[in-house]
Image (cartoon, rainbow, N blue to C red):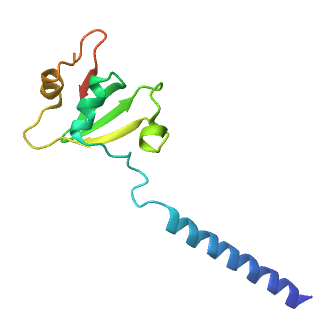
Amino acid sequence: MLVARIGYVLIILVIATAAAAIAMVLRPDDAAHPPMLEFQEVINYSHFGVIDRIDVRGQTLTVHFKDSFDTTDRFGTSTHTFEAPVPTGQDIVSALQAAGIEVNKSGGLQVSSH
């Protein structure tokens, strides 16, 4: 009876160890970061009107797609928040305006700096 209980404990320990190992292998290293876009993709998607707003933090953009846009089909993820690096010497507001996109106006794309 004691041997059976020790056997059950060992089986549970093996299963728990295997589950922990699988979870560590399958978890992406950057799970805390939103998926990445290229700067030009942000301009293109802004032109099509599917971006709700853009937050600027230094050289990084946080892009929020509209809830009605199907990110699963295009990007393979259900999240609507992405990040994009700003190339050196570029400014998102100037780039959007050069592409003919209204920025920070009523009905236009909202861009905020933090």
Query: At x 45% / y 36%, what residue is drawn?
Result: 71
Q: Residue furthest left?
A: 89
Q: Residue furthest right?
A: 1
95 horizontally vs 110: left or right: left
Is residue 114 visible in this depiction of the protein? no
Q: Residue 75 placed where, x, y %?
A: 42, 42
Query: At x 32% / y 46%, what residue is drawn?
Result: 36
Quadrant (top left, top right, bottom left, bottom right) of the N terminus: bottom right
Q: Residue 79 placed where, x, y %?
A: 46, 39
33 horizontally vs 86: left or right: right
To which quarter of the image does residue 30 belong? bottom left
To which quarter of the image does residue 2 belong? bottom right
56 horizontally vs 11: left or right: left
Exactly how many numbered labels are in the figure? 0
To which quarter of the image does residue 103 belong? top left
Query: At x 17% / y 31%, what residue is drawn?
Result: 92
Quadrant (top left, top right, bottom left, bottom right) of the C terminus: top left
Q: Residue 77 placed where, x, y %?
A: 47, 43
